[in-house]
Structure formats: structure tokens, C-alpha cells
Amino acid sequence: MSRHLDIDLLRTFVAIAETRTLGRAADQVGRTQAAVSMQVKKLEEMLNQPLLNRTGRGVTLTLHGERLLGHARTILRHHDAAVADVSGAGLSGTLRFGCPDDYAAAFLPHILRSFAGLHPQVFVEVYCAPTPRLQEQLAKHALDLALISTADTGAAAAILRREPLVWVGNRHDDAASREPLQLALSDPDTLDHRWACERLEAAGRPYRVAYASGAMSGLLAVVRSGQAIAVLTQAAVPDDLQVLPTSRQLPRLPTVGLTIRFDLPRPPALVLEFAEQLRRIVPAL
């Protein structure tokens, strides 16, 4: 039996993996559920491996199915980009973009609106999370590209934008003066968490990480309650909160750089075009 991977079979398989049911996948690819089931069977026979576990609630991927999913997504991205480029039909397809949670509100509306105006046939899936989680998703090829926060080492060519980290508190309380200082920080492996702790320890200021989470909404809720202060990039500070002045007890924090990372060494045309749009827009926001 031929071992060539058929594009239609792969597209159906990805639809099943994303919807977790044969019925919804059939609607997505425009086939009957029976036809979708036959396509899966054909793909399993060709690879000589089970790809799906069928349950009462739908389907889950087997270990072999999980392995195929990453390859299938990569093949489809390259296929769709090649068809659009050679046919002159313009860019189309799906692009998976990661953005640090603290930049989402400030940057994403401008980025997505401008790109949609140039390429209306492209669907952009957005995943917001702290930088270490974005890097994990890139390593698994679950994202095509991501904006990444990095230490500002002065490599101007690689950094799109520099953002100072700042202490942030409620406008109507004195959380910054409490002893020990109560902090609401992102995940322990993020730059803001590490640098906040390092600077306070160097200054000899007692502190306690009262709340740690990768969810920006949770951090902001704690700060708004007046129970703790947070560390954010300056662009991410909401209007109802305030940047706290630095002092000997609240030391100045470093600046982070914002750069682009890809999941592939040679990204397809669609991904490169989105990256170019990021390079044009992000520095000016």
C-alpha cells in the first residue's frame, strides 16, 4: 500500500483532533460522518497504527495520533501557503500566534485588525500565556510563532520593543508599605517573578508571594482588591491601577525586550508575512 499522506485525509484528521467528535469534524470538512469515519480508517490502515480512541463523549487521540497531529498541521500549513503563493490567490489558511498575556489588551486589537485588513482570508488563532508557556507550545509545534519576552541584552536587531517592568498597585490603598510586602506575581519561571524577588532580596525588603498565577486576570483582581502589588510591563498597566514610584524599599526593575520566535527554522510564507506585520506595528504601539 502506498505510504503517501493524502492532504484531504490529513485535513479531516486535524478537524477530528480539534473538534473531538466525528460529527463536528464532518461539518467542518463538508463530508458525512460515515465518510469521515472511512477516511480515518484509511489513514490508520496506511500508517498501520490506531489514531483514535472512541468514547461515549467523542474521540481522543492515541499516542500515534498525537504524533501524527504535529506533522499533519505542519504539512497543511506548508501546503496551503504553497497553493496561495503559486496560484496568486493571496494568503489564506490558519495561523497560530502566541502572545504574552500582559500585552494582549494593549497590542492584540491593533495587530489582528491590521493583518485582517491585508489578508482577510487568513484565520489567526491566538494563545495568550506567560513566555515560558509560549516557548513550550513552540517546542511542541502547537504555535507557528509567538512574541516572547526576553532579557534586554542590547541586541537591537532582534528586539522589536523594550518595555520597563514596573510595580503596580491599587490607587486607593497602601499595599506597598505593608511588611512583609505582599506580591501578586506571574509563574515562578517568568522574568517579572524572578526579577521582582531578586531586586527585593538585594534591597533587603521582606516580601511574601501571596498569589502566583499565569493568568493576568487573576493577578489584576488581587491588585484591585488591595491585597498585594504586582509587577507588569508598563504597557500592560490598566487605567484604574497606578505605577508605584521606585525607592530604596521598592527598587527599580529591569527592562524586558519583545522579540519573535518561530516553531520552524524555515517558516512558511503565511507565518513570515505575519512576522513582518509584527515588526512594522509593535514598535509603534
Image (cartoon, rainbow, N blue to C red):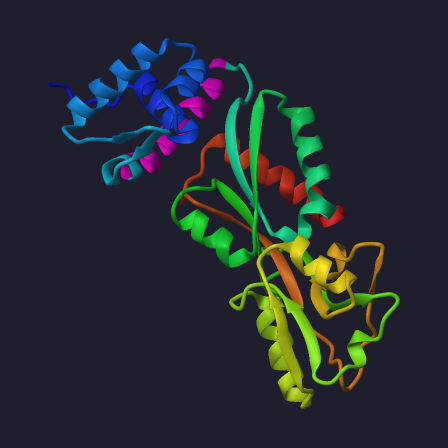
Residue farthest right in this picture = 172
Vertical relation: 250 (above or below) 157: below
Vertical relation: 7 (above or below) 238: above
Vertical relation: 194 (above or below) 11: below
Vertical relation: 61 (above or below) 213: above
Q: Find out whether residue 82 is within the magenta segment.
A: yes
Q: Would you identify the image quadrant in which residue 239 lies?
A: bottom right
Which residue is depicted at the point 47% across and 14% down?
87
Q: How many marks?
A: 0
Q: Main secondary structure of the magenta part?
A: helix
Q: Is residue 256 left or right of residue 269?
A: right
Rendering coords of residue 154 (x, y %): 62, 66
Q: From which residue to which does the magenta span run? A: 67-87
Rendering coords of residue 217 (x, y %): 67, 53
Query: Along the line of sight, which residue is nearer the eye, 22 or 109?
Result: 22
Query: Is residue 254 visible to us here?
Result: no
Rendering coords of residue 211 (x, y %): 62, 67
Query: Along the line of sight, which residue is nearer the eye, 31 or 111?
Result: 31
Q: Find out whether residue 159 is within the magenta segment.
A: no
Which residue is depicted at the point 40% across and 24% down?
15
Q: Is residue 234 left or right of residue 191?
A: right
Q: Quadrant of the N terminus?
A: top left
Query: Along the line of sight, which residue is nearer the eye, 215 or 250?
Result: 215
